Amino acid sequence: VPTDTRNSIDPADYKHIVFFTGAGMSAESGVPTYRGKGGVW
């Protein structure tokens, strides 16, 4: 995110924050999975 954009956003103005991630986020990173042992599916 460009610096000028980051400086214009105040997280306190929002109730919810959403993060979109891609294939780089995985179980190896400690993120729970939807499939497999202990998953939702």
Image (tube, rainbow, N blue to C red):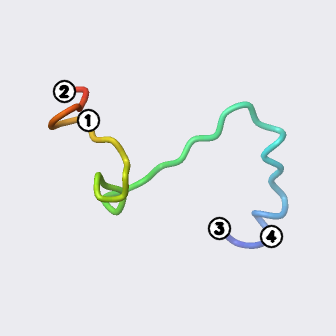
Residue at mark 3 to residue at mark 1: CA–CA distance: 29 Å
Residue 30 position (above or below residue 6): above
Residue 4 image label: 4
Q: Which quadrant of the rendered structure holds the C terminus?
A: top left
How crowded pointer 4 is (Cα within 10 Å; few <14, some 14-19, many 20+) is rated as: few
Residue 30 position (above or below residue 40): below
Q: Residue at x 70, y 72 (%)?
A: 2
Q: Earlier in the sequence, mark 2 or mark 3?
A: 3
Q: Residue at x 47, y 49 (%)?
A: 20
Labels 1 & 2 near each other (Cβ < 8 A): yes
- 8 sits to left or right of 22: right
Mark 1 — residue?
34
Residue at mark 4 to residue at mark 3: CA–CA distance: 8 Å
Mark 2 — residue?
41
Residue 1 image label: 3
Q: Earlier in the sequence, mark 4 or mark 1?
A: 4
The kind of secondary structure element at disc 1 is loop
Residue at mark 4 to residue at mark 1: CA–CA distance: 36 Å
- 28 sits to left or right of 21: left
Amino acid on which disc 1 is placed: Tyr
The kind of secondary structure element at disc 4 is helix
Residue 3 image label: none
The kind of secondary structure element at disc 2 is loop
Closest to the observer: 29 or 7?
A: 29
Q: Earlier in the sequence, mark 4 or mark 2?
A: 4
Q: Position of residue 4 (x, y in %)?
A: 80, 70
